[in-house]
Image: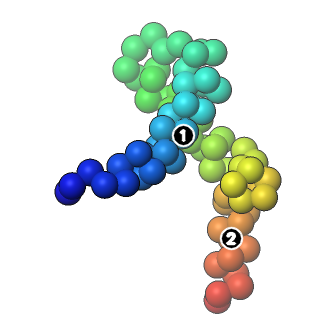
Amino acid sequence: MDGKGRAIDNAFIERLWRSVKYEKLYLHPPKNGTDLYLLLADYFNYYNMERRHTGIDDQIPEQLYLALTKEVA
């Protein structure tokens, strides 16, 4: 891998982890590894199932996915 485009490739991941930190971890600091695991599991469930995303016209990812798979089938 030559590193070309690396900043662009990492933009999504950097934005995701910024959201995780500011919306969950800084508000509810974990006490140990198990607590961190549970906080992250809770956040990613919220992120995919309830949170609206501006990148997909304020839709919820799960609902968009289900609608698209229904159209294809």
What is the x, y in percent for residue 54? 74, 50
Closer to the N terminus: mark 2 or mark 1?
1
Mark 2 neighbour density, 10 Å: few (under 14) some (14–19) many (20 or more): few
Quarter that holds the N terminus: bottom left
What is the x, y in percent for residue 56? 71, 59
Q: Residue at x 44, y 29 (%)?
A: 37
**Mark 2: which amino acid?**
Leu
Mark 1 neighbour density, 10 Å: few (under 14) some (14–19) many (20 or more): few
Q: Residue at x 41, y 45 (%)?
A: 7
Choose mark 2 or mark 1, whichever is in front: 1
Rounded to the nearest angstrom, the CA distance separating label 2 from label 1 is 22 Å
**Frontmost residue, 57 versus 64:** 57
The answer to whether the residues at label 2 and label 1 have Cβ atoms under 8 Å apart is no
Q: Is residue 37 left or right of residue 49?
A: left
Residue located beneath label 1 in the image: 16
Residue 66, labelled with which disc? 2
* Dot 1: element: helix
* Dot 2: element: helix
Q: Residue at x 71, y 50 (%)?
A: 53
Image-quadrant location for residue 61:
bottom right
**Mark 1: which amino acid?**
Leu
